[in-house]
Amino acid sequence: MKLIVERLVKQFDDFSFEASFQADIGSFITLLGPSGGGKTTALQLISGLIPPDSGHIHFGDIELSRLEPWKRDIGFVFQDYALFPHMSVEENVAYGLQQRQGARQKKEEITDRVSQMLTLVGLEGFEKRKPETLSGGERQRVALARAIAPDPRLLLFDEPLSALDAPLRSRLREEIRELQKKLGITTIYVTHDRDEALSMSDLIVIMNEGRVIEQGAPRTLYRKPATLFTARFLGEGSTITREGKKSFFRPENATLLLEPEDSALRGKMKSLRYLGGRALATIILADKTEISAMVPEQRIDDFEEHKGKPVWVRIDKETLIRVS
Ligand SMILES: Nc1ncnc2c1ncn2[C@@H]1O[C@H](COP(=O)(O)OP(=O)(O)OP(=O)(O)O)[C@@H](O)[C@H]1O
């Protein structure tokens, strides 16, 4: 069973969007790309907030794009939480249930479901609190509980963690991913943060300028990107020309040497930037190309006083990537 986004098209005055991608039902899909790439537009089209000019969205046997937005069974979590300020935590979570399931839903059933959801996101005891008394992370947990309470078929996240500090962001990443796995909800997650995309996803869809550049599993896209855009977006790297073709390599696949070696590239050390546990060396080759190589902690001493001096760089051949 697949989620298939098929040639979804939307034309704004000066922005054209066209995207196709597909993934297994139950998987965690991340739309990754720079600002203005069309990620939010993709979510809005999928949820039905804006109508597409053409295209289809299939969820298994169901054609979502034929359904009215409120019949699509979609949960949404935004960056700014979008909680109702005058409602308590439990009222916020219950709101989604009452909307979806109609007023006939028994009161006790709603109460049970709300407390089950709050337990799931680690917020027992917060039932009566108002959003203004909560931290950013707690608010985002409420938003998550509200989104999953009606048991949606699809969960959409739009940069949910970008307002939070780094340690909290990384904790919530793990929590969201674990919860998603446990519940098996098909999820589409929008971010411009590559670490987030690499650490959370089953599938990453790279978007730029309203188009899908490529899609793949995190490690495949990182190690074997088809395009220079994806290669650069997913991490550090350098481009060299070999036999007239552009080749890309990651700094961790390049070894810095003090002595010449067969097929190692000769250059001059430009800088060495310490990153904690390792350092990133920048080397200028004879043709003025700048490349970078990772130096492990135990070898940093060898190169620390080496600025401006000759060095050699050995690149693992099998890690060189042909890119277009
Ligand atoms: N309703 C609209 N009318 C006109 N243009 C729009 C509309 N919605 C989005 N756009 C344009 O579409 C482009 C893509 O915007 P979108 O928000 O989808 O990008 P994004 O990848 O989510 O970026 P960000 O990370 O900054 O949110 C932008 O140039 C935006 O101005």
Image: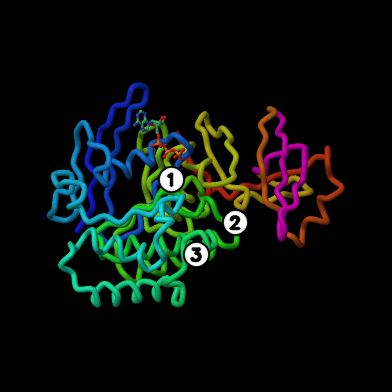
Queried whether the magenta region covers residue 206, the answer comes back as no
Which residue does the numbered mark 2 point to in the structure image? 165
**Identity of the amino acid at label 2?**
Asp
Answer yes or no: disc 3 within 8 Å of ligand 1.
no
Note whether 29 is above or below 230 in the view shown: below
SS state under label 3: helix
Sequence-first disc among 3 and 2: 3
The residue where tag 1 is placed is 32
Classify residue 56 as left or right of residue 75. Answer: left
Does 293 sit above or below residue 148? above
Q: Which residue position holds label 3?
A: 138
Gap between marks 1 and 3 measured at Cα? 25 Å
Q: Is residue 28 left or right of residue 219?
A: left
Question: Label 1 amino acid?
Answer: Leu
- Dividing the picture into quadrants, the one containing residue 210 is top left
In the depicted view, which residue is nearer to us: 215 or 120? 120
Q: Quadrant of ligand 1?
A: top left
* 278 falls in the magenta region: yes
Question: Splitting the image into 4 quarters, where does residue 238 fall?
Answer: top right
Element under label 2? loop
Q: Is mark 1 within 8 Å of ligand 1?
A: no
Q: Position of residue 186 (x, y in %)?
A: 29, 59
Indicate the amino acid at tag 3.
Glu
Expressed as whole percent of the image width and height from the top left, the position of residue 114 reads: 33, 72
Picture coordinates of residue 305 (x, y %)? 87, 48
* CA distance separating discs 3 and 2: 13 Å
Q: Secondary structure at mark 1?
A: strand
Q: Magenta stretch: give its range.
A: 263-286
Q: Nearer the N terminus, badge 1 or badge 3?
A: 1
Residue 36, quarter of picture: top left
> Considering depth in this image, is 113 or 304 the residue closer to the camera?
113
